[in-house]
Image (cartoon, grey):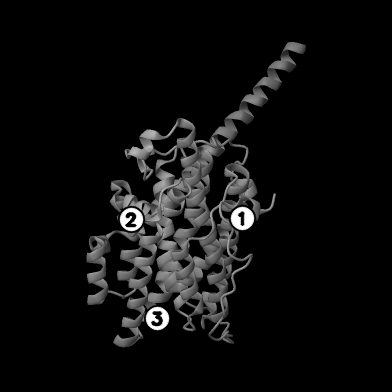
Amino acid sequence: MSTHDLYITPPPAPTWQVPATGAARFSWDYDDGRERLLALYQKGKDKQWDGNKRIDWSLEVDPADPLGTPDEALTLYGTPHWAKMTERDRGELRKHYTSWQFSQFLHGEQGAMVCAARIVESVPDLDAKFYSATQTMDEARHAEIYGRFLHEKVGMLYPVNDNLQGLLGDTLRDSRWDMPYLGMQVLIEGLALAAFGMIRDTTTRPLPKQILAYVMQDEARHVAFGRMALRDYYKQLSAAELREREEFVIEGCYLMRDRLSGVEVLENFGIGKQEAKDLSEHSEYLQLFRKLLFSRIVPCVKDIGLWGERLQKAYVDMGVFDLGDSNLDLLMAQDEEVAEQLDRDRFAVEEQARVAEVADAIAEGGAGD
């Protein structure tokens, strides 16, 4: 079945064309580059994996509750609308929310793939080109996996959210080579990591947990890459140049905060746009969710040297300023450990099955004798 047949509302056009600006840069210096970045490049090569093999696609997903997360996370929970819904309606609502969330993940991963390819093209340093090439492959794998989950397990897609598309467009149209780093590695990837983590840690379904944990293991490297490259570069910029980038971060953060309301889902259940916005704005869960979503962005922005007065005031307004002191390295290490523990658990189960199979074969042979 074509993807376009699965969209709740069809995209306005089959493709989206963003005019490219800026220069493609070649480096003729093939000597060793920055040790930290080359070490990350080596890790990127070592950690490549196949989504067809590492993920157990035989696991079933309940269409009426694909994630098994608490209903309290749904915007309509506890409202008069929820009280009027049948259990079948509630199952459809869960399915739509899962479709909407994972569709935005899918579109964001395609955007990350394009931005990583743009970095390969435009960044001046060869070591950064090397790492970006591994990230491009990572993002292709993530888009493949999210697409497969939506096609095979959910059977429904939502178009790209307007605010996400707007931030992607702004990132790709900018001719400065560092902007794909800032827009994608710091803002979009940072926000995605937090969203992935919240679902990974609350889902009771093994398949989406595997998908999110393994994707997050890759994304932890990507954010580290952005931090290394931008921290080095932003030390060289003037105060005016830093202010320009802080303005981009402020606008992007407001866009991403507003992206996460899921108004499109509520509209598909007959709720008017304004009421849907009001319900989302006053949802206690979404208020907490929005704050936690910036747990990866704020400390990263501070770490790379963008921490001017206007930016700090914007974070105070969003209620996320205190996240600037979060330990980003610890969060990334935890993401790595969750994925590695899933692998250990799965391999242990498989090993037990093999041992049992051998024991049964020996027992059968003994009985025959």
- Cβ–Cβ under 8 Å for marks 3 and 1: no
- Cβ–Cβ under 8 Å for marks 1 and 2: no
- Counting residues from the N terminus, which is met first, the one under dot 1 or under dot 2? 1
Q: CA distance from mark 2 to mark 3?
A: 30 Å
Q: Position of residue 235 (x, y in %)?
A: 34, 82
Q: Position of residue 64 (x, y in %)?
A: 51, 36
Q: CA distance from mark 1 to mark 2?
A: 27 Å
SS type, badge 1: helix
Three-letter code for the amino acid on which mark 2 is drawn: Arg
Q: In the picture provided, is 61 more to the left or to the right than 317? A: right
Q: Residues within 10 Å of mark 3 (few under 14, many from 20)?
A: few
Residue 68, quarter of picture: top left
Which residue position is annotated with label 3?
233
User: Can you say which quadrant of the picture contains the C terminus?
Assistant: top right
Query: In the rendered image of this protein, does residue 314 appear above or below residue 2?
Result: below
- Counting residues from the N terminus, which is met first, the one under dot 3 or under dot 1? 1
| Of the two numbered discs 3 and 1 in the rendering, the one whose residue sits closer to the viewer | 1
Which residue position is annotated with label 1?
144
Q: Position of residue 240 (x, y in %)?
A: 31, 87
Residue at image location 40% in from the left, 76% down from the top: 230
SS type, badge 2: helix
Three-letter code for the amino acid on which mark 1 is drawn: Glu
Q: In the picture provided, is 308 more to the left or to the right than 46? A: left
Q: CA distance from mark 3 to mark 1?
A: 32 Å
Q: In the picture provided, is 55 more to the left or to the right than 67? A: right
Residue 257, quarter of picture: bottom left
Along the line of sight, which residue is nearer the eye, 161 or 311? 161
Q: Residues within 10 Å of mark 1 (few under 14, many from 20)?
A: some
